[in-house]
Image (cartoon, rainbow, N blue to C red):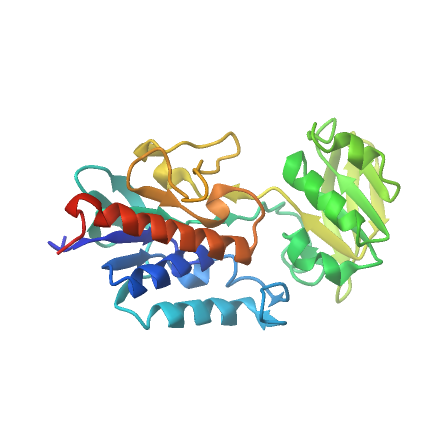
C-alpha cells in the first residue's frame, strides 16, 4: 500500500464517476478513479440519441470521450474492482490488487440490468430487446411492445411507452402490478393490457424481435406478436458500501441528501444510477458534478486536504 492519501476516491468509471473526476481534477484535488469504463452500462449500450448536444453516438464511443476528458487532468484511473472499504481517519479501499487511502469517497457504481436468462434475450439485445424505455422508446413509436417486470419502475416504463406505442402488453410474474402509485392509471389507459402471473419463456424473431412467448397463471404457452421487449427492474450495485453504514432504501439504492449528494456518513457521497431515479446519462452527469463539488468542500474544510 502506498503512503499516498488521495483527497477523493471515486468508485465507478461510468458517466457519474468520470464527471466527478473531471470536476475534481479541475479543482486540483488529488483524485483516483477505481473502475473499468468498459464495465459501465453506457459502454454496453448501442446508439444513444438522448444525450444533449449529441444527436447520435455509440455508447462505447461516448464513455471513451468521458475518459479522455478526465485524463486531461492529473487523475489516476485504475481499472480494478473495490472489494472492501474500511472507514477511519481516512478511508482504506481494497481492490483486487492494491490498497488506496482517501479522505473522501464518491460512490458511482451504477446499477445492473435485470436479466431474464431466457432463450432469445441475449441474441436480440439491441435488436428489439431493451433495458431502458426512456432510452429506446422512441424507436418503437406506433408499434406494439411488451414490458416485462413489476413495481414502480416497470409501471413508469409502461406508462411512458403507452404515450409512444400503439399497444403495450405488461407482463408481470406477480398477482398484480405491485405499483400502488400507478396501478389505477395503468388500468385506465386504453392501449395498455396487463397480464399477471406471467412467466416469460422466450423471445423470438428473425433478424429482429417479432414475438414473445409466455405462460400466464400456469396456463398454456401464449405467443404474442410484438416488435420490442423492454425488461425493467435493474438492481443497484450498492453491496460494497453497506458496511460503511450509509442508508440503503428497500430497492437497494444509496440514500442521498439532494442537491449535495451526501450520505449519512461524513465524507461519503453518491451519484448516478446507484441513487435511484431515472437511469439516464444526463442525470448521472448532473449528480456526478454535484457530488464532486460537495466532496471538494468536505476535503478542503478543517485542513483535510491532502498535502
x and y percent of residue 168 in the render? Answer: 81, 47
Residue at the spot x=56%, y=48% of the render? 113
Residue at the spot x=39%, y=54% of the render? 12
| Left or right, 218 with reference to 260 | right
Q: Report if residue 96 is visible in the image.
A: no
x and y percent of residue 171 in the render? Answer: 75, 39
Q: Report if residue 154 is visible in the image.
A: yes
Of 88 and 240, the residue lying toward us: 88
| Left or right, 37 with reference to 207 | left
Residue at the extreme right of the image, as rendered: 190
Q: Give the number of marks.
A: 0
x and y percent of residue 305 in the render? Answer: 18, 51
Considering the image in quadrants, where does the C terminus appear? Answer: bottom left
Residue at the spot x=73%, y=31% of the render? 177
| Left or right, 228 with reference to 276 | right
x and y percent of residue 94 in the render? Answer: 24, 47
Determine which quarter of the picture holds residue 85: top left
Residue 252 position (above or below residue 169) = above
Of 82 and 159, the residue lying toward us: 159
Determine which quarter of the picture holds residue 124: bottom right
Residue at the spot x=41%, y=60% of the render? 19
Of 8 and 120, the residue lying toward us: 8
Residue 291 position (above or below residue 173) = below
Amino acid at each position: 500500500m502506498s503512503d499516498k492519501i488521495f483527497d477523493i476516491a471515486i468508485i465507478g468509471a461510468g458517466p457519474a464517476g468520470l464527471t466527478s473526476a473531471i470536476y475534481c481534477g479541475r479543482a486540483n484535488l488529488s483524485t483516483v478513479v477505481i473502475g473499468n469504463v468498459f464495465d459501465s452500462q453506457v459502454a454496453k449500450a448501442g446508439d444513444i440519441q438522448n444525450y444533449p448536444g449529441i444527436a447520435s453516438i455509440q455508447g462505447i464511443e461516448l464513455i471513451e470521450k468521458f475518459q479522455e476528458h478526465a485524463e486531461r487532468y492529473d487523475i489516476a484511473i485504475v481499472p480494478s474492482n473495490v472489494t472492501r472499504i474500511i472507514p477511519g481517519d481516512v478511508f482504506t479501499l481494497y481492490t483486487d490488487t492494491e490498497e488506496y487511502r482517501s479522505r473522501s469517497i464518491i460512490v458511482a457504481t451504477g446499477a445492473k440490468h435485470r436479466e431474464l436468462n431466457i432463450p432469445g434475450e441475449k441474441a436480440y439485445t439491441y435488436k428489439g430487446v431493451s433495458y431502458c424505455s426512456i432510452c429506446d422508446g422512441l424507436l418503437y413509436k406506433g408499434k406494439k411492445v411488451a414490458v416485462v417486470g413489476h413495481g414502480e419502475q416497470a409501471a413508469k416504463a409502461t406508462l411512458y411507452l403507452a404515450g409512444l406505442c400503439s399497444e403495450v402488453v405488461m407482463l408481470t410474474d406477480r398477482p398484480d402490478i405491485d405499483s400502488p402509485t400507478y396501478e389505477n392509471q395503468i388500468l385506465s389507459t386504453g392501449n395498455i393490457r396487463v397480464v399477471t402471473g406471467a412467466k416469460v419463456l422466450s423471445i423470438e424473431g428473425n433478424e429482429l424481435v417479432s414475438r414473445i412467448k409466455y405462460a400466464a397463471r400456469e396456463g398454456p404457452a401464449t405467443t404474442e406478436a410484438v416488435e420490442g421487449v423492454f425488461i425493467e427492474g435493474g438492481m443497484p450495485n450498492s453491496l460494497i458500501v453497506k458496511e460503511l453504514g450509509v442508508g440503503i432504501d428497500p430497492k437497494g439504492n444509496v440514500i442521498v441528501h439532494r442537491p449535495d449528494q451526501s450520505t449519512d456518513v461524513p465524507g461519503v457521497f453518491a451519484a448516478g444510477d446507484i441513487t435511484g431515479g431515472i437511469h439516464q446519462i444526463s442525470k448521472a452527469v448532473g449528480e456526478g458534478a454535484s457530488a464532486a463539488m460537495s466532496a471538494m468542500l468536505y476535503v478542503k474544510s478543517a485542513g483535510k486536504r491532502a498535502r
